[in-house]
Image: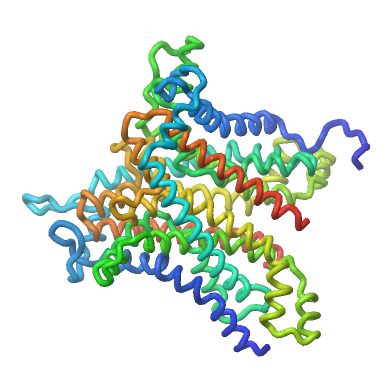
Amino acid sequence: MADKKRAFDVTTLPGFTAIAIMAFVLLYAPIITLVIYSFNGGNSVSQWGGFSLQWYVVAWNNEAVQDATARSLIIAVWAAVISTTVATMAALGTTRRGRFKGQTVIYVIINQPLMVPEIVTAVALPIFFSSVKVATGYSGLGYLILAHSAFCIPFAYLPIKARLEGMDTTMETAAADLYATPWQTFRYVTLPLLLPGVIAGAMLAFIISLDNVIITEFVKSAGQDTLPTYMLGQLRRALTPEVNAISTALLALTVLILTVFFFVTKKRD
Amino acid sequence: MSGRSKGATGWLLSAPALILLVLAASGPLLIVAVYSVLEKGDYSGVRWILSGDGWFNVLFQRDIFDQTVGLADANLSIFWRSVKLSIATTIITFAFGLPTAWFIATRPAKSRAIWLFLITIPFWTNLLIRTFAIMEVIRNQGLLNTFLIWTGAISEPIQILYTDTAVLIGMAYVYLPLMVLPLYAAIDRFDFRLIEAGYDLYASRWQVLRGVILPIIRPGIVAGSILVFIPSLGAYVTPRVLGGGKNMMIGNFIELQFGQGQNWPLGAALSTVLLLIVLGSLLVYTRVTSKDDPRG
């Protein structure tokens, strides 16, 4: 079929390729411009003043940025660990054991953060958290970690579930036939096979937490800025390429994680 | 395993996830629903007295002096802007998304993964960063105006930032990947021999597109449109950053009620309206896709 010459390729539609190329250019041009200006020697986000790393140095030495970075990473690591753990359990509970009563309810609740507009959750959460704050006196990062963990669950759940559905059950049956306890079967057979899905899920959860703006902006107490909420605050002021430098660093981290994700999930084919 | 114990294990294993989600995702929705029928507090918050004012104020307002009831024009213009911009965003992303998805799906298997990856990167990139990137392009001294002045097309920069157009450009930009991915998934399953059959029967390219391709990839079109329409309608960051303070959408209007507006019941009622629209769209989606499912 491949070497059969056709009068024209049936898969081409007029103008489609041109529009597609334009779409890719339009998608990347703003991001590339943003990255280029992060290396600007001048202090404008649109006037080029020669190549320099000065804005990375400025951002690096800015205490507010250091604090926000540390906070973002702490929250993202916790949120990734918690959401991946509970999502793995939920995926094991809802996959490969046949349909059971209430399964749809579980799906709806798990996927809720994907469907409900974030702003609605964001305005309602502080109402709940403020009463907990009054009752317990605790005002640490726990609220943000809880909110992020819940929000990240569907992102962790989907790749783990996909992996589980693609795995066949013969290995586990074999382990059980050889008198492995259910725990041993899970620990030495299911989990190692599931691991790529778990890693993929954890990475997506980490990115989602790291990027979250709206819920964080509403739930955070004073002095609990994360990198995105710090940047949102900066956008109101006169912009300097410092914001470009922070954005570029975050962008690089996202691309790095996605590249790893790409290879982790690709291997299974 | 019996049916009952299967279900019990399923629920038990899902319990930790469900508890977290009920605490920090479903619970808040319940708070919103309850607060929408309570009386407004003096400064902020609510009084625990049943009241229809929150819902009343979604569409109407009472004159402070003579108590006459009129339509709340300011609210209506915000709803209209939100719906208008969300529909426009959906149409624009479809116009760009369909050719893009088609282009990716018709690449050879090897390079297809790379094109797909190129769509996925913006999808996973921080929304704020992408909004900020588009802001730098459309600002008065930005790339677009500088370029247009350089070509001589205009002599003065056009004010795009802080207008509805800016919000529209921004939303179309940030949500394009959400349109491309489901369209790609639909086109990827498409049997290209059907096009050949169409041409063999003397259909024009336009007839093939209208009569063969679009009907078959309809679930992808519906999925993409809903994935773009829902977040557009509830958008908060993009209108806040690109629209400035004046060009609010529902999301910003809700925030205003819980903040400076100090009218929590109204904010809660608006949130509930938004939730109901989302629910409605999802119902339409399940309807359309289940009808397309050959298994009925």
Residue B10 is at least partly visible in this image = yes
Q: Horizontal placement of B118 versus B63: left or right?
A: right
Q: Could you tell me which quadrant the C terminus of chain A lies in?
A: bottom right
Residue A110 or B247: which is nearer the viewer?
Answer: A110
Q: Which residue shows up at 78% across the image and 80% down it?
A: A175
Q: Position of residue A218 (x, y in %)?
A: 33, 53
Judge whether B127 appears above or below A148 on screen.
above
Q: Which residue lies furthest to the front in this view?
A: A61
Q: Report how many numbered discs are placed on residues in the image.
A: 0
Q: Which colour scheme is used?
A: rainbow
Please identify the quarter of the rendering in which residue A21 is found. Answer: top right
Q: Which residue shows up at 77% across the image and 38% down it?
A: A11
Q: Position of residue B141 (x, y in %)?
A: 40, 20
Judge whether B142 appears above or below B111 on screen.
above
Residue B215 is at least partly visible in this image = no
Q: Could you tell me which quadrant the N terminus of chain A lies in?
A: top right
Q: Position of residue A74 (x, y in %)?
A: 45, 55
Q: Horizontal placement of B102 versus B180: left or right?
A: right
Judge whether B207 appears above or below A157 on screen.
above
Residue A25 or A169: which is nearer the viewer?
Answer: A169
Q: Which residue shows up at 44% across the image and 37% down it?
A: A60
Q: Where is residue A125 in the image (x, y as percent from the top left)?
A: 34, 62
Residue A133 or B40: which is nearer the viewer?
Answer: A133
Please identify the quarter of the rendering in which residue A163 is found. Answer: bottom right
